[in-house]
């Protein structure tokens, strides 16, 4: 089987977080960062990614993993149309190291026009997040073309997951393999190294809904994903 083309890939690089939002769909933070070898286990099988979401936890608390992701996409010459990171607007969102690696991701990705709804790096601006540093972050990051606000100040869509007591049902859909090795669905690599097909599950609900360990990603796609 040749390398895969993914419409969406999410990698949960950490379960650490420096906030305690009451709506958090992940649930309680954990002292866990992803192993670099698990990132490699997945990226080595991919040649093209449409939307590459680097998530957590709070992504700015594991800059080493973001650097490693960039190194691997360069090494495997993976085409990435767009990266996507949501940061919570804490002190760590302001770190020079975090901004520097985000700039490098932006340089690497193919999409350069940031005039639409999506920015590569967005800061959560809803009513649940601690906003003490938000003004400082907006002032520091507004000069970067890839930075913007999440746009949820007036309305936030929620799933009933983790600490969120209200919201929508969060269904899990299977992955499918289409002609030309297009792997469709939400491919999600969690910080434990497990592959799932939904990126919005709480940590608790991820357990029991894993498809396989990432070291078996290739054989799972080959033998278990429905083909069209
Ligand atoms: S919503 Fe994000 S910032 Fe808030 S506690 Fe959850 S992971 Fe942390």
Image: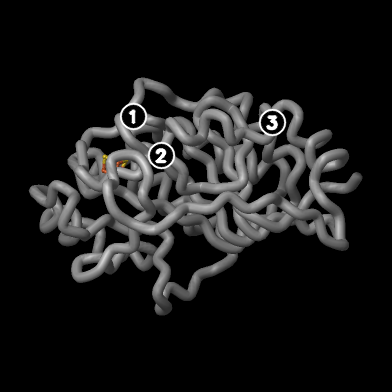
First-in-chain label (2 vs 3):
2
Name which residue lies at 76% across and 54% down: 176
Position above or below: 130 against 65 = below
Most distant residue in the bottom direction: 115
The dot on residue 212 is: 3
Quarter of image, res 185: bottom right
Mark 1 → mark 3, Cα distance in angstroms: 23 Å
Quadrant of ligand 1: it is top left
Q: Residue at image x 28%, y 40%? A: 163
Q: Is residue 149 visible?
A: no
Residue found farthest to the right: 1
Left or right position of 22 against 86:
left
Q: Residue 179 at what x, y percent from top left?
A: 87, 62
In front: 201, or 79? 201
Q: How many marks?
A: 3
User: Do labels 1 and 2 touch, CB within 8 Å?
Assistant: yes
Ligand 1 within 8 Å of the CB at mark 2: yes
* Marker disc for residue 16: 1
As drawn, 168 above or below 90? below
Residue, disc 2? 56
């Amino acid at each position: 089987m040749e390398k895969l083309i993914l419409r969406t890939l999410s990698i949960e690089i950490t379960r650490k977080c420096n906030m305690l939002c009451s709506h958090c769909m992940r649930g309680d933070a954990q002292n866990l960062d992803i192993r670099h070898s698990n990132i490699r286990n997945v990226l080595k099988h991919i040649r093209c990614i449409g939307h590459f979401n680097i998530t957590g936890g709070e992504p700015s608390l594991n800059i080493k993993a973001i650097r490693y992701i960039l190194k691997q996409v360069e090494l495997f010459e993976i085409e990435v149309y767009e990266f996507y990171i949501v940061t919570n607007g804490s002190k760590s969102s302001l770190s020079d190291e975090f901004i520097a690696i985000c700039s490098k991701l932006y340089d690497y990705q193919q999409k350069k026009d940031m005039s639409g709804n999506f920015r590569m790096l967005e800061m959560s601006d809803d009513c649940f997040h601690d906003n003490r540093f938000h003004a400082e972050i907006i002032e520091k990051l507004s000069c970067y073309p890839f930075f913007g606000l999440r746009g949820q100040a007036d309305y936030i869509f929620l799933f009933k997951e983790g600490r969120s007591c209200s919201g929508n049902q969060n269904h899990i859909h299977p992955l499918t393999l289409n002609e030309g090795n297009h792997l469709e669905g939400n491919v999600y690599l969690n910080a434990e190294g497990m592959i799932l097909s939904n990126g919005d599950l709480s940590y608790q609900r991820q357990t029991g809904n894993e498809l396989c360990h990432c070291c078996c990603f290739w054989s799972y796609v080959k033998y278990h994903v429905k083909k069209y």
